[in-house]
């Protein structure tokens, strides 16, 4: 257990300048704090910080003295008072809040909530929800307001790009797949599959060695062009099969469309919504030009309709700005890397330095003439004019690692930029475009993460053109929601040998890995290390085999060396899953889960299109374990991850397969008729809810890709009914509810001796209540606080409970010690019972209680720099609690206050421990004896501890000691 | 329906309308002034009462020569039983017809019933028909391309020239349907049932028929291609029927339940082959070697035989089937398990013959002598008997039940052991104390009958109806009650030990797994 759980989120609007221009608020994301800085002198000077919720991603000033902070993992808004630097209220909002703006008359707070695609509107005066505005787009994230305050703009982070897949659908496990529409005679290539990608030829040319081994029949990615035609990468028009009279051949309806909403335009008073479309597929940030009113949206656009890795090498994503007309909602798009012609995958280092990658921030000057855009991937800042064209030819301004949001202080010709990866603030003189100051914030991010991150995100380091990285598709370590055909016509067949772990006997030789693998959806990088092999097909035995992606897909000149690859691997191994949004706070399976957006297919009692009933995920688990009994889904999809086992059954029991030379595991694969007996890794099931949005049963589809390897299945309802021939609507709802609730562990584990229920691998995830917060301003009983304490009290809890508040005017912190059921304050000597602590709560001295991942509670609550010396003790001694290297000269002992008590029941020793040391009570009867006898082992905890010697020594003396080995 | 109206006369004639293949309806054409007529007709459902209501649109068409037809106006629609009218003031002497148009492309029709519907040329492209019932529907020329027909039932449907292109029909039942000329290319028919389906000239190129039941399917002219997936047995049968197999080595091959109509097996080696129940109608087995082959229930009608090596008993069967044996002396012959449907055995001497399991359905048995013959399981539906036929009383009773009807009969204590009574109707009959052991009584109807103390031990009762029957103390041990219906039956003291219950409706209405 570490003291830092890595959710790998990135900021949205992390920097805000106060209305009077003297105060700068910055979200210190990894530290879960809001930093307050004085900028009157020119360089930011820290005034202090306020602990908010988990993963603060946005801060906005509502007034000169009040700031609202969106906490993504906590699903909360912290309302911070600037003057007293305290959280005066915490607002629980819909899952995954990203940004907050204030608009309308009277002004209301508009909060973008990504998970369920809505904007929650709150009255700031009473913090009550006015309405929830559902949006027709995936993951509304960054927001902005029109100059007159009447319109709110929300950009969809996973908006898609009107590309989709033509494929077969899904058959029952033991059935062969249906015919692929790409093979039909009346299609652009007369049924040839795969079709050529350049006239009648393949470019690059097919490896002659493949001539005797036909490529597997796969789907086709098509994309809607400006004329509304659905085209492939060779000018093949597939419109008839997408939205024409023959749409049923691809499982669609005539008129099927992807509106491709990229920007929601919300009337701040009437709450009506319109959309701007066709901007780009990842809309990362936006700002409104104060003069023209145009909305500048920056982000990336994928060209995933283009096939084959050699063709896509280095060029698969463009970094763009789209300027949207606020009335007509039309747009003009500009490439933010105009120095690139994308004719080669590599350019000179000097050209690469000009590139912008992963743009996460944009801000306009007040005269609308200049826009500033940061590149989180490229570590730099560029400027654009009102038409979106880059200004100047000099290299961009080099900032810290991972620049994101900005605040523009025109009065002082300064721009403040938050650098996410190195936790610093760059101050840029906008007149001469020089960095004048860099302030490092305290960043508790473990070194293993900082060291490895560049290999995921750094576009200049890891690509030949300087504008792409792994994170261009694995956005924030997750997915772009698209499928890509990264087949390689020039490559060779890869033989499957007995190092692969198959749940069935080894497939026939002809089922080896063909290089023309067809479209595959981007996979998440969450919790992948230790769960090898990789890719949908399991064709990469370890991360080490991905160097070819750096060189042959990203154009990186030399790839990673061994050490760098290990650093990347170690970093990836830290990324875990966020709390499941469907489980109740006790992390159990929901028994009455509403399933909006899931509807019947008409095969049961409900007519087609009727909403599915609420699902009982607990019943769904039973179905998962028993469907097609006696094996159930768990025959392949072990719990709690859904992955296959990394064991093999020897006839009696499951035996661990030894890891490979790179510590790579061998999770199970299958080759089943449904997949044409081609090998596939048994996929994990913890992010299925991320793949919703595609809809083939109606004419309006939010996403172009859904479930399974090529994204061809639009809904879990269709998946479970077509795969497992379920027709009962309630059974279907129950199973879907369980699949949505999959992540969060706490599921029945397999058995070493049951051949049909193998032990699974552990899941790196967090319980549902992670981040849950409450702010109290009095001592009245709070059922939620009681629940928080209860959730943290279990000895096996995956949650710690911390409290932040004020005592005697000072900001203080507490950590809930579950063994003693008390709150340890940030002064070693001070502890409170829950009631005593809550009694300190009052208006002006509010207390915020938060559940955090187990192991991180002490750091977040009472020991910011995790050096073993509590924050207030260090402050009392005049030291910086955010500097682990400096400790008071006479620090409190880590083990101290030892007392001994003798009773008829023996001897009891009491002592006081500071950090979680596993202590032992030892004794000997003579100091001359070199050996100590251990009485009690592993007495661990913080605060007062004790151990006993129940024997009554017959000797005249006995000597005791407490050892922390 | 075509109708020509001289303009200068006013004539109202009602004629039966048979436009396309829609349900018949009457149209009327009446003069409406010197140069105008009014065509009228009632709106009817294309499906019978009880089915999903399907109201077509109607397109009036006009022709001057009964060859070239022109649409008149736009398609019209109306409510059930509403009379629609269309006036034509062209003043041209014309014939008129009304065409029904059913347009249900992409419709959500899961689990609906369209049985016996008149759905010719209907458009069901892309429709959701999961689990739908279209038994006996007229679907000739219909477009079912890309439709979802999984688990649908199209028993005895007419699908002539229909399109099933890219249809999703795994698990669908097409038994007995006519699929002549169907375009089923790229369709998914895995585990579908095509029992007895006519597939002549049907196109199954690139279709998937893996696991499909193709027993007795007529493959003559059926089109496949190299991408068609079909199990080895039906593939072999298709090859024999379409490509011929003269001189082929088919030793030990399974060709049972196959429609080998007109197959060229001249000189083929069919030793030890299994041809049980196959149809060799007009097939050529001259010079073929069928030594050791299983020829039980083979239909030899029209089969060409010459220098064929075959057990003498089967040659006799062939002879009887093709030439008849009226008045012949066939004493003691072995004709067990033979297919002799409609055979002419008028006055034939079959004393002591072995007719165990012989199919004499429709045969002329008038005046035949079955004295001492083994008549166990003889199939007698439709056969002809008269007062001169010498036959044991049990077999006579069986014949009576099957041909004269068994409803309401009192045959308490009757011996019906080892008989064939499949499909027999014995509603409201008294079979108390009857002995019906080890008999074939699949699909027999015993509704409301008294079977008290009867003994059915070991009998096949698949699909039998025992609704409200009195089974008190009856012996049903070791019977097969798969798909049987015992709703409301009285079973006090009845013995069901060893009986097979599968999808059986039990007396309380529950269904066994």
Image (cartoon, coloured by chain):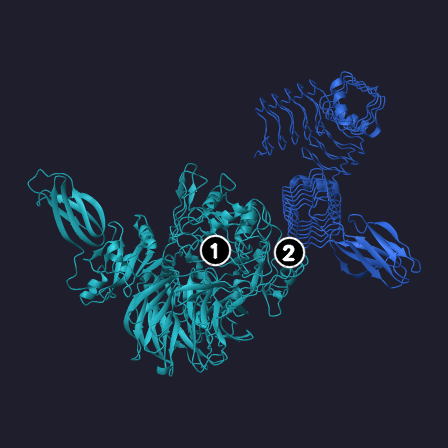
Chain colours: A cyan, B blue
First in sequence: mark 2 vs mark 1: 2
Q: Chain of mark 1?
A: A
Reply above or below: B139 against A135. Answer: above
Reply above or below: B225 against A355. Answer: above
Q: Which quarter of the figure has residue A228?
A: bottom right
Q: Residues within 10 Å of mark 1 (few under 14, many from 20)?
A: many
Task: Tell me if residue A470 can be seen.
Answer: no
Distance from label 2 to label 1 (Cα)? 26 Å
x, y percent for residue B244 = 75, 41
Label 1: which residue?
A: A689
Residue at position x 81%, y 59% in the image: B86
Residue at position x 36%, y 73% in the image: A63
SS class of the residue under badge 1? helix
Label 2: which residue?
A: A248
Q: Are marks 2 and 1 in contact (CB under 8 Å)?
A: no
Are both tags, 2 and 1, on one chain?
Answer: yes
């Amino acid at each position: 257990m570490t003291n830092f759980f890595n959710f790998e989120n990135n900021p949205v609007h992390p920097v805000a300048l106060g209305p009077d221009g003297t105060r700068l608020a910055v979200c210190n994301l990894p530290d879960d704090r809001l930093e307050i800085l004085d900028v009157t002198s020119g360089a930011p000077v820290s005034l202090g910080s306020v602990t908010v919720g988990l993963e603060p991603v946005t801060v906005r000033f509502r007034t000169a003295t009040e700031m609202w902070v969106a906490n993504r993992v906590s699903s909360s808004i912290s309302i911070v008072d600037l003057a007293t630097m305290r959280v005066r209220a915490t607002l629980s909002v819909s899952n995954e809040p990203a940004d907050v703006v204030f608009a309308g008359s009277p002004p209301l707070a508009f909060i973008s909530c990504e998970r369920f695609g809505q904007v929650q509107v709150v009255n700031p005066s009473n913090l009550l929800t006015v309405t929830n505005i559902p949006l027709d787009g995936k993951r509304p994230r960054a927001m902005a307001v029109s100059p007159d305050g009447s319109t709110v703009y929300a950009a969809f982070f996973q908006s898609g790009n009107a590309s989709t897949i033509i494929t077969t659908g899904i058959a029952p496990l033991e059935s062969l797949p249906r015919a692929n529409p790409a093979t039909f005679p009346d299609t652009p290539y007369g049924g040839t599959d795969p079709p050529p990608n350049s006239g009648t030829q393949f470019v690059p040319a097919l490896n002659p060695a493949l001539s005797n081994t036909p490529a597997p029949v796969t789907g086709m990615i098509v994309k809607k062009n400006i004329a509304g035609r659905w085209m492939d990468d060779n000018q093949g028009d597939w419109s008839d099969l997408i939205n024409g009279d023959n749409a049923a051949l691809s499982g669609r309806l005539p008129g099927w469309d992807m509106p491709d909403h990229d920007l929601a335009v919300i009337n701040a008073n009437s709450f009506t919504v319109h959309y701007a479309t066709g901007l780009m597929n990842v809309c990362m940030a936006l700002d409104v030009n104060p003069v023209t009113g145009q909305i500048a949206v920056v982000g990336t656009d994928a060209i995933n309709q283009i096939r084959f890795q050699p063709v896509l090498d280095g060029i698969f994503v463009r970094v763009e700005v789209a300027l949207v007309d606020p009335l007509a909602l039309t747009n003009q798009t500009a490439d933010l890397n105009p120095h690139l012609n994308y004719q080669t995958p590599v350019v000179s280092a000097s050209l690469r330095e000009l590139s912008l990658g992963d743009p996460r921030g944009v801000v306009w000057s007040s005269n609308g003439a200049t826009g500033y855009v940061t590149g989180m991937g490229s570590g730099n800042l560029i400027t654009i004019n009102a038409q979106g064209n880059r200004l100047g030819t000099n290299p961009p301004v080099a900032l810290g690692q991972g620049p994101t949001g900005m605040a523009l202080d025109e009065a002082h010709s300064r721009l403040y930029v938050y650098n996410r990866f190195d936790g610093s603030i760059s101050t840029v003189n906008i007149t001469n475009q020089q960095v004048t100051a860099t302030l490092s914030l305290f960043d508790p991010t473990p070194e293993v993460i900082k060291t490895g991150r560049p290999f995921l995100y750094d576009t200049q380091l890891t690509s030949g053109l300087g504008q792409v990285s792994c994170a261009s598709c694995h956005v924030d370590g997750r997915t772009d929601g698209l499928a890509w055909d990264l087949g390689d016509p020039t490559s060779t067949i890869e033989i499957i040998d007995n190092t692969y772990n198959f749940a069935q006997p080894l497939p026939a030789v002809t089922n080896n890995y063909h290089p023309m693998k067809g479209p595959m959806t981007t996979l998440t990088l969450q919790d992948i290390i230790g769960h090898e092999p990789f890719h949908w097909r399991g064709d990469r035995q370890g991360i080490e085999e991905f160097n070819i992606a750096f060189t042959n897909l990203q154009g990186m000149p030399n790839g990673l060396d061994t050490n760098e690859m290990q650093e990347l691997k170690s970093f990836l191994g830290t990324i875990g899953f966020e709390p499941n949004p469907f489980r109740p706070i006790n992390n159990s399976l929901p028994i009455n889960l509403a399933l909006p957006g899931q509807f019947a297919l008409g095969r049961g009692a409900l007519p087609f299109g009727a909403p599915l009933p609420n699902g009982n995920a607990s019943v769904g688990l039973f179905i998962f374990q028993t469907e097609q009994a006696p094996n159930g889904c768990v025959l392949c999809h072990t719990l709690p991850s859904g992955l296959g086992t990394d064991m093999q059954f020897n006839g009696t029991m499951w035996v661990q397969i030894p890891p490979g030379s790179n510590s790579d595991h061998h999770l199970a694969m299958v080759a089943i008729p449904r997949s044409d007996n081609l090998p596939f890794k048994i996929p994990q099931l913890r992010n299925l809810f991320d793949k919703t949005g595609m809809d083939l049963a109606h004419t309006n589809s939010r996403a172009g890709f859904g479930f399974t390897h090529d994204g061809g299945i639009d809904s879990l309802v269709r998946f479970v009914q077509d795969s497992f021939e379920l027709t009962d609507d309630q059974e279907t709802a129950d199973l879907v509810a369980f699949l949505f609730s999959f992540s969060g562990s706490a599921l029945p584990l397999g058995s070493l001796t049951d051949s049909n229920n193998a032990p699974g691998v552990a899941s790196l995830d967090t319980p549902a209540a992670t981040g849950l917060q409450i702010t109290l301003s009095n001592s009245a009983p709070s059922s939620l606080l009681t629940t928080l304490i209860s959730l943290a009290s279990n000895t096996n809890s995956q949650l710690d409970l911390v409290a932040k508040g004020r005592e005697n005017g000072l900001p203080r912190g507490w950590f809930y010690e579950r063994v003693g059921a008390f709150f340890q304050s940030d002064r070693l000597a001070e502890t409170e019972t829950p009631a005593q602590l809550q009694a300190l709560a009052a208006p002006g001295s509010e207390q915020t209680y938060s559940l955090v991942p187990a192991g991180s509670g002490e750091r977040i609550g009472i020991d910011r720099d995790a050096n073993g010396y509590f924050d207030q003790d260090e402050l009392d001694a005049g030291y910086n609690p955010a500097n682990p290297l400096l400790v008071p000269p006479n620090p409190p002992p880590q083990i101290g206050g030892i007392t001994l008590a003798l009773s008829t029941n023996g001897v009891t020793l009491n002592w006081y421990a500071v950090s979680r040391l596993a202590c032992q009570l030892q004794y000997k009867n003579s100091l001359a004896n070199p050996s100590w006898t251990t009485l009690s082992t592993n007495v661990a905890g913080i605060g007062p501890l004790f151990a006993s010697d129940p024997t009554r020594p017959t000797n005249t003396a006995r000597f005791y000691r407490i050892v922390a080995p | 329906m075509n109708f020509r109206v001289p303009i200068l006369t006013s004539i109202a004639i009602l004629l039966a309308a048979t436009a396309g293949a829609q349900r018949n309806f009457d149209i009327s054409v009446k003069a409406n002034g010197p140069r105008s007529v009014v065509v009228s007709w009632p709106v009817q459902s294309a499906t019978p009462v009880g089915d999903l209501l399907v109201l077509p649109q109607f397109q009036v068409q006009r022709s001057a020569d009964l060859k070239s037809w022109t649409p008149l106006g736009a398609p019209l629609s109306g409510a059930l039983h509403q009379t629609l009218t269309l006036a034509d003031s062209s003043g041209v002497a014309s014939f008129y017809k009304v065409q029904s148009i059913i347009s249900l492309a992409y419709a959500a029709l899961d689990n609906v019933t369209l049985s016996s519907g008149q759905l010719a040329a209907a458009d069901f492209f892309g429709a959701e028909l999961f689990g739908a019932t279209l038994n006996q529907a007229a679907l000739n020329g219909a477009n079912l391309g890309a439709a979802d027909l999984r688990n649908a039932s199209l028993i005895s449907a007419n699908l002539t020239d229909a399109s099933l292109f890219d249809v999703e029909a795994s698990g669908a039942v097409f038994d007995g349907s006519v699929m002549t000329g169907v375009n089923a290319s790229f369709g998914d028919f895995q585990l579908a049932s095509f029992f007895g389906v006519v597939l002549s000239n049907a196109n199954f190129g690139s279709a998937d028929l893996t696991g499909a039941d193709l027993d007795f399917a007529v493959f003559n002219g059926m089109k496949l291609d190299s991408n068609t997936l079909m199990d080895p047995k039906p593939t072999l049968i298709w090859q024999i029927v379409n490509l011929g197999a003269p001189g082929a080595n088919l030793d030990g091959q399974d060709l049972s339940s196959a429609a080998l109509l007109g197959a060229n097996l001249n000189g083929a080696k069919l030793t030890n082959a299994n041809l049980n129940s196959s149809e060799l109608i007009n097939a050529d087995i001259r010079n073929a070697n069928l030594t050791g082959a299983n020829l039980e229930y083979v239909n030899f009608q029209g089969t060409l035989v010459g220098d064929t090596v075959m057990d003498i008993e089967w040659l006799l069967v062939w002879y009887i089937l093709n030439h008849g044996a009226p008045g012949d002396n066939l004493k003691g012959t072995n004709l067990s398990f033979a297919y002799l449907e409609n055979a002419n055995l008028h006055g034939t001497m079959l004393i002591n013959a072995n007719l165990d399991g012989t199919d004499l359905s429709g045969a002329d048995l008038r005046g035949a002598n079955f004295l001492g013959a083994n008549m166990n399981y003889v199939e007698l539906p439709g056969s002809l008997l008269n007062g001169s036929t010498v036959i044991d009383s049990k077999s006579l009773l069986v014949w009576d039940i099957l041909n004269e009807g068994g409803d309401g009969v009192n045959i308490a204590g009757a011996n019906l052991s080892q008989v064939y009574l499949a499909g027999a109707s014995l509603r409201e009959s008294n079979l108390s104390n009857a002995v019906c052991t080890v008999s074939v009584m699949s699909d027999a109807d015993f509704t409301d009958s008294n079977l008290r103390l009867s003994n059915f031990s070991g009998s096949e009762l698949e699909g039998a109806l025992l609704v409200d029957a009195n089974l008190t103390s009856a012996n049903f041990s070791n019977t097969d009650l798969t798909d049987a219906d015992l709703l409301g039956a009285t079973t006090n003291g009845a013995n069901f030990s060893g009986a097979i219950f599968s999808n059986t409706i039990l007396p309380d209405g529950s269904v066994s797994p």
